Amino acid sequence: MTDWQIGPVPGRGLRRVNGEALALPFHISRGGQHCAIAELELTPAEAEQLHAALCYALGEQLPPPDAPECRQPVRYPGGRRRY
């Protein structure tokens, strides 16, 4: 393991750039010392793929009460609960 860490930047969320692309800022540090802020830039298609992958990975976990609508269970009449 290295002493590099990457995580979201507090107070700075996802934003649109260059028309349709999305950018998510990340704080990069090494040994507890700030090194840089870099953005992960995604096309809409890449963002959809990431969204689908995260929903799939989280699928077995119950969503917290304040989770986005797409993570809330959907109940179908006469059917089982789906996410």
Image (cartoon, rainbow, N blue to C red):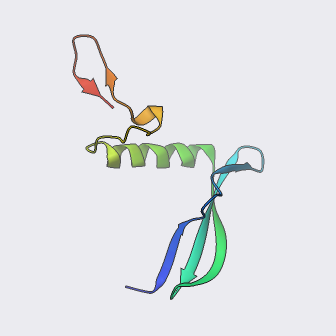
Which residue occupies 55% across, 47% down? 47
Image point 43% across, 43% down: which residue?
52
- Where in the figure is residue 57, as x and y percent of width and height? 33, 49
Residue at the front extreme of this rendering: 65
Q: In this view, does 53 lie above or below 36?
A: above
Q: Where is residue 51 in the image (x, y as percent from the top left)?
A: 47, 45
Query: Vertical placement of 12 versus 57: above or below?
Result: below
Which quadrant of the figure contains the N terminus?
Answer: bottom left
Look at the image and tell me in which quarter the C terminus lies: top left
| Residue at x 63%, y 51% (from the top left corner) | 14
Q: Which residue lies furthest to the right in this view?
A: 18
Q: Give the x, y percent position of residue 59.
A: 30, 42
Identify which residue is drawn at 71% across, 43% down. Answer: 20
Relative height, residue 15 to residue 79 (above, below): below
* Picture quadrant where residue 9 is located: bottom right
Is 13 above or below relative to 74? below
62 vs 30, left or right, is: left
Give the side of residue 72 with respect to residue 29, left or right: left
Pick the front one: 46 or 1? 1
Front one among 69 and 66: 66
| Residue 69 x/y as whole percent | 46, 31
